[in-house]
Image (spheres, rainbow, N blue to C red):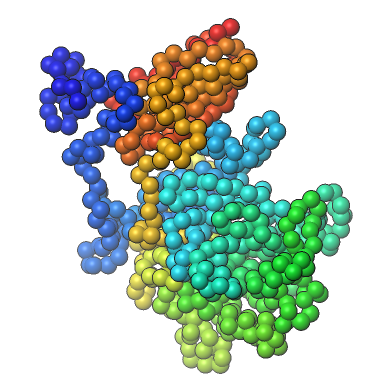
Amino acid sequence: MDKVTQQQIEDGLAQPATRRSFLGKSALLGLTGAGVSFGLAACKENGGAAAPAASASAKAAGGELGHEVQPGQLDDYYHFSSGGHSGEARILGLPSGRTLRRIPVFNIDPMVGWGITNESKAIMGTKADGSLKYTTGDTHHVHGSYKDGIYDGRWLFINDKMHGRLARIRMDTMECDKIIELPNIQGFHGIFPDKCDPVDPKINYTTRVFCGAEFHIPLPNDGRDLGDPSKWGCLFTCVDAASMEVRWQVRVDGNMDLVATSYDGKLAASNQYNVENGADLASMMSAERDACVFFDVARIEALVKAGKFTTIGGSKVPVVDGRKAANPDAKTAVTCYVPVGKNPHGVNASPDGKYFVCSGKLSPTATVIELALVQKWFAGELKDARDAVVAEPEIGLGPLHTAFDGKGNAYTTLFLDSQIVKWNVDKAIAHFKGDKTAKVVMDRIDVHYQPGHGYSSMGETKEADGKYYNSGNKFSKDRFLPVGPLHSETEQLINISGEKMKLISDHTAYPEPHDGIMVRRDLVKTRQIYHMDDFANAVKTPADSRVERKGNKVSIFLMSQAPNYSMPIIKVKKGDEVTLTLTNHDKVEDLTHGCAIPTHNVNFIVNPQETKSVTFKTDKPGAYWIYCTHFCHALHLEMRSRLLVEG
Ligand code: CUK
Ligand code: CUA
Ligand code: CA
């Protein structure tokens, strides 16, 4: 490091003390290629206020769980949520409710360049002309991959109900790395990873993701049977978690809504609100009961292995017939339809691994199904599938989704009552058996208003800790400052550690999250920077920084290092197809650069040691400043390069 000169100090480029001396002119202006940079982020490494790794623990004065997380303290939980028809996923810190990050998935996000860079377009899927196949999505459910019954911090899976797509997010970088479109389905709604292999218990981690389809469609959907919905069908889909290839599908009677999986890997299930196979509202509500359909995963895979399947249309995916008529004998059946309350919405697995709970929107009940009894049915030892139901307590109006505290209690959202009801599973079972003195409902709390999903801290794992519950409300009205006709959504945090539920805070949500998970922070291990070698197209050395032309195809290989791009002038010609590849050589955590080019619709960022590329056409001669959009350095505004388009 050169010494700070008096001249630099007088020029305001440097100050005569400690870390500030890093802002010397040579550091400011040099692009050394050696990779050491001294941007603003260097403050942190040089005695700045690094955040203490202290836990929030969020204890209010009385030693109770609260929501306040003091400045400099960290939240106890990551909250991963879907973003509804915004098409994204989100990360909040809980209990504070602070937004930490938005993860673009099915949407376009110019902040990071999602849908703009070639790499993100390749993940999202393109048409023959290179443009995006879809630019919209509708995410509902986000779930993490498991090991030993708890989150392993590897992946998040998220659905797109609109275009029938499944996406995977890497949890080390919190970026989507894969999106696939499921064949021959519509209204892909429920999604859940498995937690174990059904046959080999040594595979005690997620290898499959199950996907339910809500809407009946002609099979294949090529214009046939348009006037005869009775011929339409719904398929349950299994995707390989690692390869993200579709393994198999099962055709069912009725439809599918949400999905749950057993801890032993043997069963997956989906609640059905349309056992009627109805095509209009009245017919979808005509049956007295609907169902929860269970899938025997091992049997399905044995049939696939034995070649006992069909395919539909142009898809090569094996389709096993799970309709009742094709499965008359329980001992060989792949599906079991357990009757539950009318038009259910939601199926959730209890942390002890014993029960699935479905709630009926049009029935004031929750239905508790014992998995051991479903297994008995599949073994031919239970006459009626309905006998797998061990409780059906009346809990309130419009019950939707159920969460658990790991202490035997369930928490169900009541959409119509605008309440969360806490009820005890064992008491409900006792009551169902005939003990009319058993007090099932333990507590109720008002929420504001109309809750959809509710979820508890670690509640979808064996380590449900019974501390926090988040109510995802669909209407907020008077809870926040009005911001026009469209209001924010409310999420309300409830302390469930005691006998009585306590509302401890409201936080806002941009429309419109559905489901979420609350993950203990020690289970999430993120990267600090990227690895340059992970990018095949990385521009590694100043010698690699260049412009190459093949006909009218021009490749620009550029590097960034605060506060410079490696080439101050880049010349191209009108009518060129330009591919610009940018590698960020900064190594300091969080030292990100942007790259925007006026009138060319180019806008993306590169994080430390990351490489991204964009392709665009040069239509109009002129000078265009390539500039850094992401504040990176005292001389961030000066971080520019000239793109000269010659006529
Ligand atoms: S769904 Cu929206 S509140 Cu898509 Cu899980 Cu129930
Ligand atoms: Cu580089 Cu701002
Ligand atoms: Ca129904």
Q: Quadrant of residue 8?
A: top left
Q: Height in image: 642 above or below 120?
A: above
x, y (%) of residue 255?
Answer: 71, 64
Q: Nearer the viewer, residue 32 or 178?
A: 32
Q: Residue at x 81, y 53 (%)?
A: 313
| Quadrant assignment for the N terminus | top left
Q: Quadrant of residue 307?
A: bottom right
Q: Residue at x 45, y 28 (%)?
A: 539
x, y (%) of residue 510?
Answer: 48, 47
Q: Nearer the viewer, residue 345 or 613?
A: 613
Is 635 displayed left or right of 178 in the figure?
left
Q: Residue furthest front?
A: 543
Q: Quadrant of residue 621?
A: top right
Q: Height in image: 96 above or below 469?
A: above
Is 45 displayed left or right of 482 in the figure?
left
How many numbered marks, from 0 up?
A: 0
Q: Is residue 137 visible?
A: yes
x, y (%) of residue 583?
Answer: 43, 30
Q: Residue at x 46, y 45 (%)?
A: 102
| Quadrant assignment for the C terminus | top right
Q: Residue at x 46, y 65 (%)?
A: 147
Q: Is residue 402 visible?
A: no
Is 276 displayed left or right of 517 in the figure?
right
x, y (%) of residue 282?
Answer: 76, 64
